[in-house]
Amino acid sequence: MDWSAIKFDWNRARAFLVTAEQGSFSAGARALGLTQPTLGRQVAALERELGVTLFERVGQGLVLTESGRAMVHHVRAMGDAATQLSMAASGQASALEGTVSITTSELEAVFLLPPVLVQLRQQYPGIHLDIQVTHEVANLTRREADIALRSFRPSQPDLIARKLYDDPVWLYGTPEYLAPFGNPTSIEELNSIQLIGFDREHQLLSVLGDKGWPLDTGNIRLTTLSLSLQWELVKRHQGLAFIPQTVGDREPLFRRAFEQFGPPLVLPLWLVCHRELHTSQRIRVVFDAIAEALSAKDNAPARSV
């Protein structure tokens, strides 16, 4: 390798890549924990070193020039290689200290993870647990998190996935809300129920339509992605919500609704980790503790009837 041919600062190349991916100096600076002027100076210095203009300003954002588009592919490969190096080094770490980041949905974060997090804090006080509660799928290969709880099995070959269980998902409501419906014998008797939806497109209606439920948008007048808010709305007799059995059956104020009209939906739970990071002792103990806690017999869903 001709080291003398490399005429630029690699840290400045990182500044260029982050700015290109984030679309502005301000967003790039936040991602790197720098000030906006510092990041701008690093990119300007790289342009001088390379003798090209990498960005042009359009409105409040930045757009890659033709030269910038040609360069960004090479710099992105450098970034991927740096990520792999960092992951390989993390995988060799044996100390039970440092940060382990876990990405999960609100369901697991609020209702399933707290006991095992308490256990981990007691057993491994040197480990800093960073819990990222999001509906977005974190890219474990790019180190957006160390461990993920997901409702689907990942397809990437460099990820380790362990299936914890399949959780039946039922409609739940309060006895007060369900009382006026009595014990219906046909789905058509449920045309006035109110469901608490989770998306504006009402994918739930499509799922229920496939099961033969004659519902429309008039049956969903409340919509929120927040499971905690859905939970509170059900408690206040505002409608029914689909809740996994492992969670819904633990709430004494809730009852399963209309089980007689077909089998429940099924929500799988997968525990995922990058293959190299799984060789890190601190990440392994967190992975194994979550796997043991959430797949334990008393945490698995009861048999549906």
Image (spheres, rainbow, N blue to C red):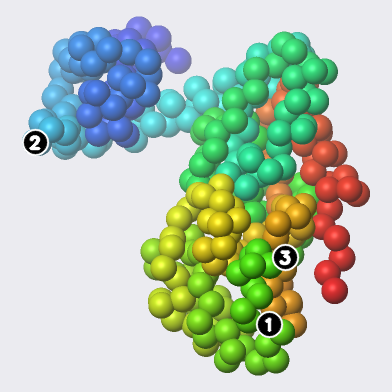
Outermost residue toward the right?
Answer: 297
Alpha-carbon span between mark 1 and mark 3: 13 Å
Q: Which residue is drawn at 72% across and 11% down?
A: 126
Q: Which of marks 1 and 3 is in front?
A: 1
Return the x and y of residue 152 as percentages of the image width and height: 64, 56
Residues 38 and 131: in front is 131
Residues 163 and 251: in front is 251
Q: Is residue 301 left or right of residue 53?
A: right
Q: Residues within 10 Å of mark 3 (few under 14, many from 20)?
A: some
Q: Which residue is drawn at 73% across and 77% down?
A: 259
Q: Which residue type does callout 3 highlight?
A: Arg
Outermost residue toward the top?
Answer: 4
Q: Which of marks 3 and 2 is in front?
A: 3
The residue pinned by badge 2 equals: 59
First along the sequence among labels 1 and 2: 2
Alpha-carbon span between mark 1 and mark 2: 60 Å
Q: Which residue type does callout 1 highlight?
A: Gly
First along the sequence among labels 1 and 3: 1
Is the C terminus in the top left, top right, bottom left or bottom right quadrant?
A: bottom right
Alpha-carbon span between mark 3 and mark 2: 54 Å
Instruction: Say which mark, if any, is on residue 255.
Output: 3
The answer to whether one can see residue 259 in this image is: yes
Return the x and y of residue 110 as percentages of the image width and height: 64, 40
Return the x and y of residue 57 as percentages of the image width and height: 10, 31
First along the sequence among labels 3 and 2: 2
| Label 1 with label 3: CB-CB less than 8 Å | no
Q: Which residue is drawn at 71% across and 33% down?
A: 114
Return the x and y of residue 69 as percentages of the image width and height: 23, 37
| Residue at disc 2, secondary structure | loop
